[in-house]
Amino acid sequence: MDWKFLEGLLSGVNKYSTAFGRIWLAVVFVFRVLIFVVAAERVWSDDQGHFDCNTRQPGCTNNCYDHYFPISHIRLWALQLIFITCPSFMVVLHVAYRGERERKYKAKHGDDTCLYDNPGQKHGGLWWTYLISLFLKTVFELTFLYLLHYVYNSFKLPRKVQCDVAPCPNLVDCYVARPTEKTVFTYFMVGTSVVCVVINICEILYLIASRIVNLKRRGSSYTSSRKIHKDECKDVTKQTYHATC
């Protein structure tokens, strides 16, 4: 998989992210993608070849491996990384859409005019797009954590499993290659996934809190401006009344 292409796309997302979003992106690349590419793939590269069962019955070892490992950890983590990064592209596409509208608006009304003060500023529809992307990333993270726990029944890999699926002649013992090392990597990837979920939740709360504060400020400024306008109208009315008298 070309992870450099994914890195290039997400670097554009970083320009429109909050501080929490930049921390999330750093955690994803340093503690997930980098560990995945440098170490995790090599650890699981020989998992099926070194899955040994105490029988020479043809097909027994392969079926037992497929029974206990229906999907590789590596492929599941690769899918997880793809799914959790895709919602961020919604923000980039929305900003690109705003940029195109801005270009057409200037072409029609002149270069001195503008439709947006800053196309990448998170207000209006872009704020909702950013918030929805955070919810989707959090849902995908939790879904894959559940799938990992559900498929393997736990995050810890056993040293030995017992298998009696066909065509095994009886209950046979099978041994997982390097279970301790794989368990360490599994806990590490699960831990970083949980950290990303916490960061996403913090960013969601931050966005909502910032939105509420901005709305209150706008409401207070609007109320004060209306009060000033009413006072000016009263002064004008009094002056007109005295002048008439």
Image: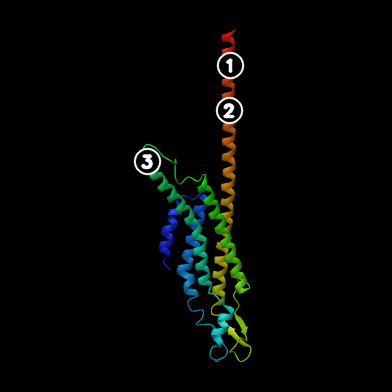
Tell me the quadrant of the picture where the N terminus can be found: bottom left
- Comparing 43 with 137, the one in front is 137
Q: Amino acid at mark 2?
A: Arg
Give how far across and how far down residue 35 sits, in percent: 48, 66
Sequence-wise, the earlier of marks 2 and 1 is: 2
Sequence-wise, the earlier of marks 3 and 1 is: 3
**Horizontal placement of 6 versus 20: left or right?**
left
Query: Which of the 4 image quarters holds residue 166?
Result: bottom right
* Rendered position, 66 above or below 104: below
Give how far across and how far down residue 237 sits, in percent: 58, 16
- Comparing 116 with 174, the one in front is 116
Residue at position x 57%, y 13% in the image: 240
Task: Kindly identify which residue carries mark 1.
Answer: 237
**Horizontal placement of 78 versus 105: left or right?**
right
Q: Amino acid at mark 1?
A: Thr
- Mark 2 is surrounded, within 10 Å at the Cα level, by few (under 14), some (14 to 19) or many (20 or more) other residues, namely few
Residue at position x 41%, y 44% in the image: 102
- Of the two numbered discs 3 and 1 in the rendering, the one whose residue sits closer to the viewer: 3
Q: Amino acid at mark 3?
A: Lys
Query: Which of the 4 image quarters holds residue 169?
Result: bottom right
* Rendered position, 192 above or below 153: above
Task: Kindly identify which residue carries mark 2.
Answer: 226
Asked if the residues shown at circle 3 and circle 1 are in contact, with their CB atoms under 8 angstroms apart, the answer is: no
For the image, the number of numbered tags is 3
- Mark 1 is surrounded, within 10 Å at the Cα level, by few (under 14), some (14 to 19) or many (20 or more) other residues, namely few
Query: The residue tagged with tag 1: helix, strand or loop?
Result: helix
Distance from disc 2 to disc 3, alpha carbons, whole Å, reads 35 Å
Task: Kindly identify which residue carries mark 3.
Answer: 108
- Of the two numbered discs 2 and 1 in the rendering, the one whose residue sits closer to the viewer: 1
Tell me the quadrant of the picture where the C terminus can be found: top right
